[in-house]
Image (cartoon, helix red, strand yellow):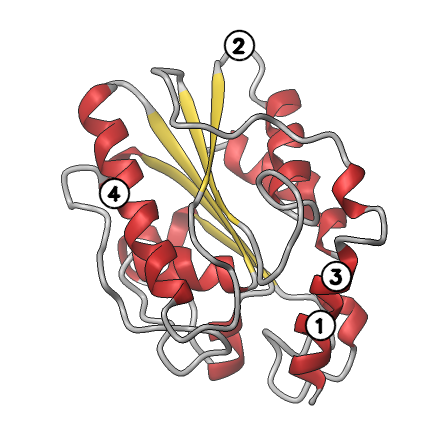
Amino acid sequence: MRIRLCLAALSLAGGAGLATLSAPMASAATCTDIDVVAARGTFEPGTLGAIVGDPVFSALQKKLTGKTLSSYAVNYPADLSLTSAAQGNADLVNHVDRQAAACPNQRFVLVGYSQGANVVDNSVGISSAGAVVGSPIVATIPGAVEPRVAAVLLFGNPIRALGKSVTGVYQSRTIDFCAKGDPICESGGGDVLAHLGYTADADAAAVFAAGRA
C-alpha cells in the first residue's frame, strides 16, 4: 500500500508545481564533452524529471565548468505497465551506443530515479526483475563503451529494497541515494514523502559526478 501511495504521489506531483522547474531541452546529443542520460521516475513530470533529472542537470552545469554538456531524456512510458522499464532499458542502451559511435570523445553520466533507476540498473547489467516496476535485462551498455560512463547517479532505487545494489565494474562510479524510510528503496520503509525529496541530493550527486568526469 505504501508503495502504491508513493507512485500515486508522483502522479499528483505534476499538478503541484514541480513541472514549473526550469528544465533543459532534452534531445539526441551532439558531440559535447558529457552527455547526461536521465531516466525519470514513474509518472514523474519534467523534461528529464522534475524531482531528480532536471535539478541534477542544472547542478552538473555548475560543477562541470569548462566542459560542454548535453542531455537526453530516456524515451519510455514510465508507467505501471509490465514492460515499461524494459522499454527504457532498450532506449537508454541504444542511445548511448549511437552516441558513442558518433562522438568518440564523448563521456556519459547516467541518472535514474525510482523506476528510472531500474532502467539504469538493467543497462549496466544489474537486473531489476522482482523490484517495484522492475524488469529483466533486455540490453546492456557494450563493453567497449563502458569505460566512457563517467558516473551513475541513482535515487530511490527499487533494487535496494531487495538487498541489491550496483556491483562490478560500475560500482566505484555509482552513487545510490536512498532516503531513510523511503518504501521504494528501503524494505519496510513507511515514509511516502521521503521518496519525493531527492531534489535535495542533486548537488551532492553533481559533486560526485564532477570528480569522475
State the residue at coordinates (71%, 54%).
Answer: 198
First-in-chain label (1 vs 2): 1
The residue carrying mark 2 is 66
Q: Is mark 2 on a helix, strand or loop?
A: loop
Disc 4 marks which amino acid? Asn
In the rendered image, residue 9, in percent from the top left (x then y), is placed at 75, 68
Q: 30 and 82: which one is in front? A: 82
Label 3 vs label 2, nearer the camera = 3
Disc 2 marks which amino acid? Gly
Label 2 vs label 4, nearer the camera = 4
Q: 25 and 205: which one is in front? A: 25
Which disc, if any, is residue 196?
Answer: 3
Q: Residues under labels 1 and 2: Cα distance?
A: 40 Å
Q: Quadrant of residue 134?
A: bottom left
Q: Residues under labels 3 and 1: Cα distance?
A: 11 Å
Question: Farthest right residue?
Answer: 16
Q: In this view, does 18 lie above or below 213?
A: below
State the residue at coordinates (27%, 46%).
Answer: 93
Disc 3 marks which amino acid? Leu
Q: Is mark 4 on a helix, strand or loop?
A: helix
Asked whether the beta carbons under mark 4 and mark 1 sit within 8 Å of each other, the answer is no
Disc 1 marks which amino acid? Ala
The residue carrying mark 1 is 8
Q: What element carries label 3?
A: helix
Q: Residues under labels 4 and 3: Cα distance?
A: 29 Å
Q: In this view, does 122 lie above or below 104?
A: below
